[in-house]
Image: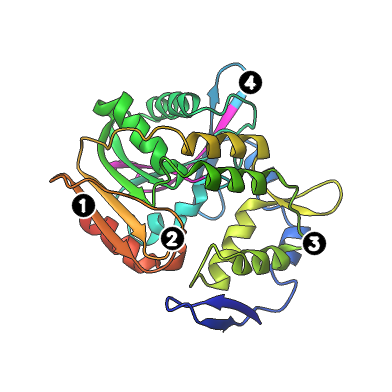
Amino acid sequence: MVAARDDDGQSRRLRRPPRGSLFGHLATGDRLGRAACRGGNGARDDGIRQAFRQAGARLRLSVVEWGDPAGTPVICLHGVTGHGRRFRRLAEERLSAYRVIGYDCRGHGRSGWEPPWSVEQHVADVVETSDALGASRATWVGHSFGGKLVAELASRHPDRVERAVLLDPAMQLDPAVAGERADLTRADVSFADADAAIEARLGDGSVFTTSWETLEEEMREHLIEGRDGRFRMQYAPAAAVVAWSEMASVTPPWPGCPTLVVCGEQSWVTVTVPRNGHITRVDVPGGHSILWDDFDAAADAIVQFLG
């Protein structure tokens, strides 16, 4: 049994599946999908359309798609240490009529990890990638650092952003907070198995009502086994440190297009949304992990906004 917190802050207990149920799959399978996906472009067995796009002479960027290939494009940008597959449930359960594109930023997931990792480079990457995908103008969804990137994109290339959805955007963080978070991501955090990784996530205060099953899927996508037999998240610590620094920098202008801002009621991120007719704020239960803590509330707000 694992302790977690309900919306009222009270402890609750989560029943864990038998130990090894996920880890056995990881240890005997494809090392969490990385080897299978490195092979090239095309549909995977789980229905996700996988592709890699070249960025410069060496770097490849990982892109996944769900939904209707002919639908209106919705491009999703994850937060620091994350990956594009975190939007899978939103895409499959709520946005199946759209062409939903999940993107691994450089330094994260299945994309190349080479620098530079600046906001300018991330924006250049998404511009180049969206052009290659034939989705130059789209609705953009960004969580945390991804929210900052969407705002930066809208500021630099307003013609590309039809609508913006910012999920607990991390913009102009307190430098002390950003520094503490950067120190944490610099540490070599590893786990004996996937169950240990899930227990650590449930106990670190970053999630409130997230289920074991949700985190199990996350670990299946995001853990990789190292040469030492330990499991680690798929991101470059140096890239994460740079991202935390960027999140403490000057806030970009709010998008001038129709914009939805979804904030976690118990999030450690403080978001001050200007009073403007084209910007809508919705607060949902839970913390910073918007699509994990209360998926239905966050997804309902997004679907209503997209019409």
Q: Is 225 placed above or below 89 here?
A: above
User: Does residue 63 show up magenta in the picture?
Assistant: yes
In the rendered structure, are the residues bearing label 4 and label 3 in contact, judged by CB atoms less than 8 Å apart?
no
Q: Which of marks 2 and 4 is nearer the N terminus?
A: 4
Q: Mark 1 points at which residue?
A: 280
| Quadrant in the rendering for residue 283 | bottom left
| Mark number, residue 267 | 2
Q: How crowded is mark 2: few (under 14 residues within 10 Å), some or many (20 or more)?
A: some
Type of the residue with mark 1: Thr
Q: How crowded is mark 1: few (under 14 residues within 10 Å), some or many (20 or more)?
A: some
| Residue 248 pos. (x, y %) | 48, 38
Q: If you read the primary sequence from the N terminus, does the residue marked by circle 4 or circle 3 appear first? A: 4
**Residue 264 against residue 30 in the figure, above or below:** below
User: What residue sits right under mark 4 in the picture?
Assistant: 58
Q: Alpha-carbon distance for marks 3 and 1?
A: 43 Å
Q: In this view, does 108 lie to the left or right of 208?
A: right
Q: What stretch is highlighted in magenta?
A: 60-79
Instruction: Please name the amino acid that badge 2 sits on.
Output: Ser
Q: Does the magenta stretch include residue 90?
A: no
Q: Give the distance between the C-alpha atoms of the residues marked 4 and 3, in whole angstroms.
A: 33 Å
Q: Quadrant of residue 92?
A: bottom left
Across and down, in percent, residue 148 comes to: 40, 39
Q: Nearer the viewer, residue 187 or 88?
A: 187
Q: Which residue is drawn at 43% across and 23% down?
A: 128
Q: Earlier in the sequence, mark 2 or mark 3?
A: 3
Residue furthest to the front in view is 176
